[in-house]
Image (spheres, helix red, strand yellow):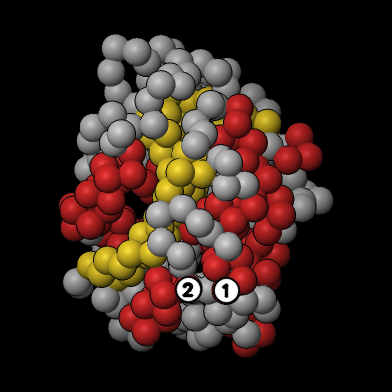
Amino acid sequence: MARRLDVIGADGVRLTAWDHTAGPGSRGTRERPPGPDSRGIVPQPGPDGAPRPGGRLGPDAAAHPGARPGLDAVPRPARAPQVPPAPQTAGSGARASVPGVLLLHGLMGHAGHWAPAVRRLTGGHRIVALDQRGHGASEKPAAGPFTREAYVADAAAVVEQLGLGPVTLVGHSMGALTAWQLAAERPDLVRALVICDMRASALGAASQRAWQDWFRRWPAPFPSLEAVHRWFGDEDPWVETPNPARGAFFAEVMAEHPDGWRPVFDPEQMLTSRETWVHDAHWDSLAQVRCPTLVVRGLDGELGRAEAQEMVRVLPHGAYAEIPDAGHLLHYTHPEAWGEAVEPFLNGVLTP
């Protein structure tokens, strides 16, 4: 169970974070991040008319040219009914004496998809997962911005307002890039860093064009969740062989509207968000990270072994871990193996 915390990000954007910290020192109502019920139904729109986000979001498969979005999802059981809670204030239950861990999801993700991994993180950590702008329960400003600078500033605001610093940042894909850029720019806020399956090299314009074409092929709005399952699991041109797990994954990122089922995120905002790692490499900012850093990849993920090891070499205090049989969503599909790789590092940097 997690407590919802409201935070103000860069440019006044309203962000939602979820505090997974357990123990007698925690205050406030504890809830699960919003997700579908046992029938796959996402909670209905709230008073502001905005659709509630779906369950755990899936792969940010944008990590190399020609990547095919969503292909490494696996079947997972439906989650129990989850009703969005009344928000807590940013300072509710803050425990400054407990080392902070901030989890940052990837593109199209939200805080809830860290849930399997969070259960593997034990010990005296204050664990907070953020719905980044444009994702999950956080605000999706029509005018943006959805720049690297905005994502990094949001993360800094969360660390400062929740009293998490110096924090250990754990990022997946896009969230990993945000994490290491914050570590490079604000070393005073960051104690340590975990990079999960994100490349430092540029992807190239062809990758962005492929994603634009992919989003345009979506036959949204979908008339039913069954139609979502069918299209993403079989009919999507990216699918070479039927993949029911992929269909189930995308059904979890849909919300019901009067005209049918649509994604909880705006595809155009997702395209804008990924532009700066499509066209730009980020080796320079990686080299500026001075804190202990663990680079984790799945054996079949989007980050190749050679590039991962070069990232470790570039980092002044880098370490490497690899999870066999895992793909891009290593923490989501293999949470136990991910925890075994990550927790010793966390304990080493968080234990006095």
- Residue lying farthest to the right in this orientation: 143
Look at label 2 and name its amino acid: Val
Q: 148 or 344: which is nearer to us?
A: 344
Disc 1 crowd rating (10 Å Cα; few below 14, some 14-19, many 20+) is: some
- Image spot of residue 217 (x, y percent): 58, 75
In this rendered view, identify the residue nearer to me: 176 or 164: 164
Which residue is at a point 42% across and 29% down the rendered structure image?
A: 19
Q: Which residue is mark 2?
A: 314
Q: Quadrant of residue 309?
A: bottom left
Q: Residue at x 42, y 34 (%)?
A: 100
Residue depicted at x 30% and y 23% = 22
**Dot 2: what SS?**
helix
Residue 30 location, x and y as percent?
A: 38, 20
Which corner quadrant holds the N terminus? top left
Q: Residue at x 68, y 59 (%)?
A: 148
Q: Position of residue 173 (x, y in %)?
A: 47, 63
Residue 224, given in percent of the width and then of the height, sits at 46, 54
Q: Secondary structure at mark 1?
A: helix
Q: Give 151 or 348, whichever is nearer the viewer.
A: 348
Q: CA separation, marks 1 and 2?
A: 8 Å
- Whether residue 92 is visible to the viewer of this picture, yes or no, is yes
Name the amino acid type tagged 1: Trp
Question: Are the residues tagged 1 and 2 within 8 Å (C-beta)?
Answer: yes
Quarter assignment of residue 81 = top left
In the image, which is nearer the foreground, mark 1 or mark 2?
Answer: 2
Q: Earlier in the sequence, mark 1 or mark 2?
A: 1
